[in-house]
Image: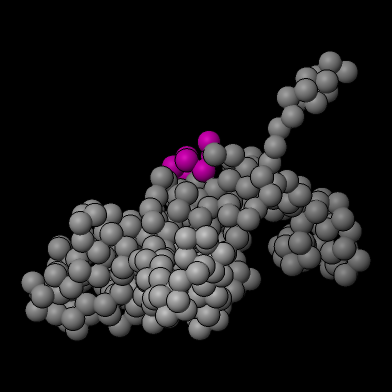
Amino acid sequence: MSFTAKDVAALREKTGAGMMDCKKALTEVNGDMTKAEEYLREQGVAVAAKKASRIASEGAVWAAVSKDGKTGALVEINCESDFVAKSPDFQALCAEIADVITANNPKDNDALLALKGKSKSTVQDLLNNATAKIGEKMSLRHFVRYESKGFIGSYIHLGGKIGILVEFAVSKDLSKNKEFTALANDVAMHIAAFNPQYVDSSVIPKEFEEKELEILKNQAMNDPKSKDKPEQVIEGMVKGRYKKQLAEICLVEQPFVRDMSNSVSSVVTNLAKSQSADIKIVRFERLVMGEGLEKKTDNLAEEVAKLSK
């Protein structure tokens, strides 16, 4: 049995599934509309489409790093409840998708959705099947992927609330060195806890520096204790305050989470000396689950009123 574009549109209207999913379904069942609808239901596509308008503001950020430490990825997958986000099935889904990103280097979300994981299903099918099985909307939000000639460390905080990737440049292979890999994990954990904005002062945009110095100068000029001091003194105060601010926003200058008496830079330098190697933090990514998403809110009074009708 053949089918037309109108049949595809009709199936889409009836099930809410995407055009390509509807076309695939009709192809699989030789144009039989009833069987095509059943096919979509079996694949979880129709179920996923019906839940598409629901808010998926919970979920997890997950990480994957290749065995050699050269490639790593972070991905945020969203669902509707924190209970599901903590479930083994959902976290296995996140882990499989993170592995797909690490292995394939997709250019965007659409490319990722079309790739296949270890289960031989596409990422889109994995999300659809999880939606059908669990009963909550599942969605891919965004991902980050690093490739490095050095080493990539990762850390996941509180089961997926925050995810970190951090890249190190190293002068020799330390991927199997337990002290180094432990430090890489600790630095990633530090980033999760302290939320630095930059690796070091060399990568701070000139515009940011100029703006902050202007703000600090105006603060000093408006302070009754310092406004009458000579300009040279005020400039010295401003530079000192800006240097203190750098220690707060630059990763390498922050007190290390495992040893607050030492900076991140000094801890990395000390390990480098002990390993007779050059080690430098190159970049990092910090993803916070649900950051900027609309959150689902429940109104108890409204729910009670609905039940009483």
Q: Which residues are magenta?
A: 83-89
**How has the structure been colored for display?**
one colour
The residue lying at 50 percent from left, 50 percent from top is 60
Q: Is residue 234 left or right of 307 when viewed as pictured?
A: left
Would you identify the image quadrant in which residue 124 lies? bottom right
The answer to whether any part of residue 68 appears in the image is yes
The residue lying at 39 percent from left, 56 percent from top is 194
Q: Is residue 7 above or below residue 104?
A: above
Would you identify the image quadrant in which residue 182 lies? bottom left
The residue lying at 59 percent from left, 59 percent from top is 140
Closer to the camera in the image, 144 or 275: 275
Q: Residue furthest right?
A: 6
Q: In which quadrant of the rendered image does the C terminus lie?
A: top right
Closer to the camera in the image, 188 or 172: 188
Q: Is residue 107 magenta?
A: no
Q: Is residue 88 left or right of 278 when viewed as pictured?
A: right
Closer to the camera in the image, 158 or 138: 158
Q: Position of residue 213 (x, y in %)?
A: 50, 75
The answer to whether any part of residue 121 appears in the image is no
Magenta: main secondary structure equals helix
Closer to the camera in the image, 293 or 65: 293
Q: Is residue 150 left or right of 7 when viewed as pictured?
A: left
Q: Is residue 241 above or below residue 48?
A: below
The residue lying at 9 percent from left, 79 percent from top is 276
Q: Position of residue 44 (x, y in %)?
A: 66, 50
Q: In which quadrant of the rendered image does the N terminus lie?
A: bottom right
Total numbered badges shown on the rendered structure: 0
Q: Is residue 77 left or right of 261 when viewed as pictured?
A: right
Q: Residue furthest front?
A: 228
Q: Position of residue 145 (x, y in %)?
A: 45, 72
Q: Is residue 200 above or below residue 79?
A: below
